Image: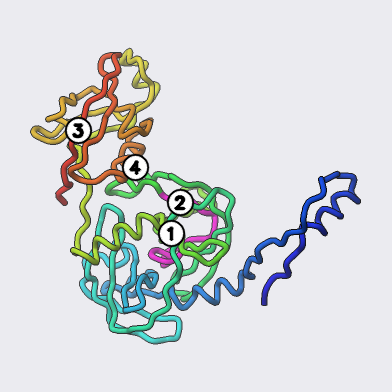
């Protein structure tokens, strides 16, 4: 069923009757938006449930029709095989052919062809857009929850993840629960905008705080995993912490935000370029840096071997150095 198309002329007439004047213009039609029930019905067969070897449950999304599925790395863990359940009740063995801990993405392959692939939207959604989450929270397969995009470019610090910080995430208030990890974040047109990854539980004082990996990152990482089984990550060779205003004041620094270099790896890219402990990185490859999360996000946008300009504040003086990035060894 399609939503009726409303001519703009009819809207104009209503505005004039309400005392709002709109200049005459040719009648137009607004492109119809499919009803949400149709969006769910179309996407549902593209979302799977993944059972790992430890008894845990997560979700996954069909990436290619020839049996390629993308999910979170933390869903599959160290397993080489998992069980994949489809919307039609079929259960198949899946081979984990590649995984990347840094971006928390993994590829699973099953022996099934002709799978339905959800269209991918690689540009970031805007705050306020409709957000649809489909997955298997707590094992309830093909559960759909609805909300909006609450923000983009979000960061979850390492202190929260227990490992590396997660950066450049999409935030949504559509309900995400254990088991939704690896499932689909869908826009109003039924396109994949992200892979659901994490949520902050109510015990932490949060209400509807969920996060997803953007589709552009999913495509980049998945294609690399399919091609070589590994992902090349740029490496700077520094350990940084977000500079706070209180630390800056106590040390008499002239900047109050940035990524404070606490360690520099000897012989690494940053050391070779002349970076020093105590430098504050305030810019990277043309992007402003206000903290450690910004630096991690900026690194995602460049490739190993690429040269990047790094603006640092050193003892109150701003200067720019050129760094040729290395490859992160995991």
Give the spatial CA distance, label 4 vs label 2: 13 Å
Secondary element under disc 3, as helix, strand or loop, is strand
**Residue 123 circle label:** none
Span highlighted in magenta in the image: 169-184
On the image, numbered disc 3 is attached to which residue?
Answer: 323
On the image, numbered disc 4 is attached to which residue?
Answer: 297
Q: Going by the image, does 179 lie left or right of 112?
A: right
Give the spatial CA distance, label 3 vs label 1: 31 Å
2 or 3: mark nearer the eye: 3
On the image, numbered disc 1 is attached to which residue?
Answer: 194
Of label 3 and label 1, which has the lower sequence position?
A: 1
Q: Pointers 1 and 2 in contact (CB under 8 A)?
A: yes
Secondary element under disc 2, as helix, strand or loop, is strand
3 or 1: mark nearer the eye: 3
Q: Residues within 10 Å of mark 1 (few under 14, many from 20)?
A: many
Of label 4 and label 2, which has the lower sequence position?
A: 2
Give the spatial CA distance, label 1 vs label 2: 7 Å
- Residue shown at the point (49%, 75%) measured from the top left: 44
Picture quadrant where residue 51 is located: bottom left
Secondary element under disc 4, as helix, strand or loop, is helix
Q: Pointers 4 and 2 in contact (CB under 8 A)?
A: no
Q: Going by the image, does 215 lie left or right of 303?
A: right
On the image, numbered disc 2 is attached to which residue?
Answer: 170
């Amino acid at each position: 069923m399609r939503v009726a198309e409303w001519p703009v002329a009819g809207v104009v007439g209503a505005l004039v009757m309400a005392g709002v004047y709109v200049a005459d213009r040719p009648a137009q039609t607004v492109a119809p938006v499919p009803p949400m029930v149709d969006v769910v019905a179309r996407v549902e067969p593209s979302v799977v449930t993944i059972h790992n070897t430890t008894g845990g449950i997560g979700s996954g999304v069909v990436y290619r029709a020839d049996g390629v599925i993308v999910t979170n790395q933390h869903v599959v863990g160290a397993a080489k095989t998992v069980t994949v359940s489809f919307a039609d009740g079929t259960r198949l063995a899946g081979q984990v052919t590649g995984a990347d801990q840094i971006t928390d993405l993994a590829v699973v392959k099953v022996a099934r062809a002709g799978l339905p692939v959800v269209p991918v939207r690689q540009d970031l959604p805007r705050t306020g857009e409709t957000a649809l989450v489909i997955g298997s929270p707590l094992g309830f397969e093909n559960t759909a929850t609805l909300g909006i995009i609450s923000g983009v470019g979000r960061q979850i610090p390492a202190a929260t993840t227990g490992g590396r910080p997660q950066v450049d995430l999409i935030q949504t208030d559509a309900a995400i629960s254990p088991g939704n990890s690896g499932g689909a974040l869908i826009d109003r047109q039924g396109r994949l905008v992200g892979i659901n990854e994490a949520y902050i539980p109510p015990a932490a004082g949060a209400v509807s705080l969920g996060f997803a990996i953007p589709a552009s990152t999913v495509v980049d990482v998945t294609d690399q995993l399919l091609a070589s089984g590994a992902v090349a990550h740029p490496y700077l060779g520094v350990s940084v912490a977000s500079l706070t205003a209180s630390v800056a004041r106590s040390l008499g620094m002239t900047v109050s935000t940035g990524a404070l270099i606490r360690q520099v790896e000897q012989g690494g890219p940053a050391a070779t370029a002349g970076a020093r402990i105590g430098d504050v990185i305030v810019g990277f490859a043309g992007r402003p840096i206000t903290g450690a999360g910004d630096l991690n996000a900026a690194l995602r946008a460049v490739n190993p071997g690429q040269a990047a300009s790094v603006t640092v504040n050193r003892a109150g003086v701003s200067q720019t150095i050129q760094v040729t990035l290395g490859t992160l060894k995991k």
